[in-house]
């Protein structure tokens, strides 16, 4: 059970982190992009040749290799990355007159 005193909001002008994030600190996406751009010599999983590839390229190649071996989730991830997710549409322009309510509920007493 939570202690009610812990549930009270901070007073005006007060917060849990008064100094905020230190200046110059990097957020997670900046750090991730930095390491994804890191280039190393690696064996290309598709061609088998040693090439200079970024970590982003290596991850993409690994997904392509998995997809080519029949991994459906890897195939979906590759296709969504390459071509975008398929658009799903819903027809919202139907009215009650477009179908027969009697057939819908199969009730003979509505005759």
Image (spheres, rainbow, N blue to C red):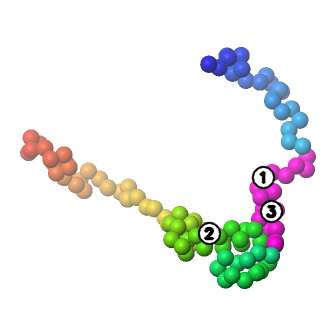
Q: Are marks 2 and 1 in contact (CB under 8 Å)?
A: no
Q: Residue at horizontal 73%, vertical 68%?
A: 56
Q: Can the viewer see residue 63 in this picture?
A: yes
Q: Which residues are magenta?
A: 23-40
Image quadrant containing the N terminus: top right
| Label at residue 7 | none
Nearest the camera: 2 or 69? 69
Q: CA distance from mark 2 to mark 3?
A: 18 Å
Residue 65 coordinates in the image, percent (x, y)? 60, 73
Residue 106 coordinates in the image, percent (x, y)? 15, 47
Q: Can the viewer see residue 80 in this picture?
A: no
- Of badges 3 and 1, nearer the viewer stands 3
Q: Is residue 9 left or right of residue 23?
A: left
Q: Are marks 3 and 1 in contact (CB under 8 Å)?
A: no
Q: Residue at horizontal 75%, vertical 68%?
A: 55
- Compare marks 2 and 1 and give the one earlier in the sequence: 1
Nearest the camera: 58 or 77? 58
| Label at residue 28 | 1
Q: Which residue was labeled with disc 2? A: 63
Question: Badge 3, how many Cα within 10 Å: few under 14, some, many 20+?
Answer: few
Residue 26 coordinates in the image, percent (x, y)? 85, 52
Q: For residue 17, which quarter of the picture?
A: top right
| Label at residue 35 | 3
Question: Badge 2, how many Cα within 10 Å: few under 14, some, many 20+?
Answer: many
Q: Is residue 33 left or right of residue 70?
A: right
- Of badges 2 and 1, nearer the viewer stands 2
């Amino acid at each position: 059970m939570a202690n009610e005193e812990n549930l009270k909001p901070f007073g005006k002008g007060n917060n849990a982190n008064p100094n905020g994030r230190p200046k110059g600190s990097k957020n997670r996406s900046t750090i991730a992009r930095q390491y994804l751009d890191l280039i190393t010599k690696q064996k290309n999983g598709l061609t088998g040749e040693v090439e200079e590839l970024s970590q982003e390229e290596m991850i993409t190649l690994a997904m392509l290799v998995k997809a080519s071996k029949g991994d459906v989730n890897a195939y979906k991830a590759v296709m969504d990355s390459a071509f975008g997710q398929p658009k799903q549409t819903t027809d919202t322009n139907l009215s009650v007159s477009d179908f027969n309510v009697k057939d819908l509920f199969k009730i003979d007493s509505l005759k």
